[in-house]
Image (cartoon, coloured by chain):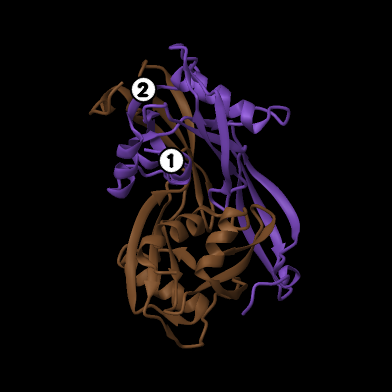
Chain colours: A purple, B brown
Amino acid sequence: MKAGKKRDRLFEPVQKRERVYAGSYLNLDRLTIRLPNGKKAFREIVNVRNAVAVLPVDKDGTAYLVRQHRPAIKRTIIEIPAGVVDSKRESLEKCARRECEEETGIIPGRLRRLLTYSHAEGYSTGFITLFLATNLRHTGKLNLDQTEFLEQVKMPYAKLLRMIEKGGIVDSKTILCAMLSRRYLPF
Amino acid sequence: MKAGKKRDRLFEPVQKRERVYAGSYLNLDRLTIRLPNGKKAFREIVNVRNAVAVLPVDKDGTAYLVRQHRPAIKRTIIEIPAGVVDSKRESLEKCARRECEEETGIIPGRLRRLLTYSHAEGYSTGFITLFLATNLRHTGKLNLDQTEFLEQVKMPYAKLLRMIEKGGIVDSKTILCAMLSRRYLPF
């Protein structure tokens, strides 16, 4: 019952990997794994690219977010700017700056890296890295994809925290990023 | 730029839904949606059942977790007990009690519901509801599935928070549940 190095006993090696769906946003693989007891089992794994998300907060305490429709959960939600990393050559910081500027028209002067986490460790390969952006420069110019429709939303950072308390923010990246930013913000 | 009711302008109605993969843990649908500009687009959506996760903390500040191999991220990780809701008739609280007992041999005396969140709003239907469990009763009896291999891990709650700081905990449910439990725990 103590935390130590026992990972070998739990390791489940992959014996076979079948691509059962190749899509534009994600691929689906069906893995045959060997359980610790030697038996076979199957795991369905969604392959997605890693992503970044960034919370821009101005020196007056204003937080900049976006409103976006999410067909997967059938809701239009308020969330922080985010997007997938374009290639292995794009650094996470560069991606965070790009997504922030494209979706809000704001260039971060300072980016603080807060956390990298797995958003669905049971079935997805995806990790998200969270940033707090401060020292903001407002360009007023957005740059959205042809199939990306979103609206800019601004609110006091303190109100964002209250919305989280009340269940008004539902996505993990916005909740985590807002909570983890607390220590760096005086609001 | 203010938070209001504008969801109609962003709503993307589903015009067609194709099941492209029917699996045991998840199903994959390809949706044809209508964008706000009238054009068509596609969204790949993973259908999974909702889940619960629960952090049991004893009156001496000991937190009970599990170590489990996660082929999706190729890592063996420490996380809180969790599982999918069995049916529409099983309440979230009942499911949290069941999973806690099955995976740790601990029956929660008191359950506090902390948050319900979407773990991958971009492509998955799944929501996770988080609980803090206190007033614990230790039965010492586990009840794991045939294909479920995990080890029990205990550590001080304060150490769990430090592990999160250092990047030693990577899954959203454990990070969020530990952070949100803080206000209810004196440790």
Residue A95 position within the rendered picture, expressed as x and y whole percent measured from the top left: 61, 27
Front residue of A11 and A67: A67
Residue B176 position within the rendered picture, expressed as x and y whole percent measured from the top left: 46, 55
* Residue that appears at 46% across and 11% down: A141
Front residue of A164 and A71: A164
- Is residue B19 left or right of B152 when viewed as pictured? left
Three-letter amino acid code at disc 1?
Answer: Thr
Q: Quadrant of the N terminus of chain B?
A: top left
Dividing the picture into quarters, in which one does residue A40 lie?
bottom right
- The chain letter under disc 1 is A
Q: Residue furthest left?
A: B5
- Is there any visible trace of residue B6 in the rendered image? yes
Front residue of A11 and B3: B3
Give the structural element (helix, strand or loop) at label 2: strand
* Residue that appears at 59% across and 34% down: A23
Q: Quadrant of the C terminus of chain B?
A: bottom left
Front position among marks 1 and 2: 1
In this rendering, the answer to whether A97 lies above or below B121 is above
In this rendering, the answer to whether A64 lies above or below A5 is above
* Residue that appears at 28% across and 24% down: B2
Residue matched to label 2? A151
In this rendering, the answer to whether A22 lies above or below B142 is above
Question: Which of pointers 1 and 2 lies earlier in the amino acid sequence?
Answer: 2
In this rendering, the answer to whether B4 lies above or below B160 is above
- The chain letter under disc 2 is A
Residue matched to label 1? A174
Three-letter amino acid code at disc 2?
Answer: Glu
- Is there any visible trace of residue B124 in the rendered image? no
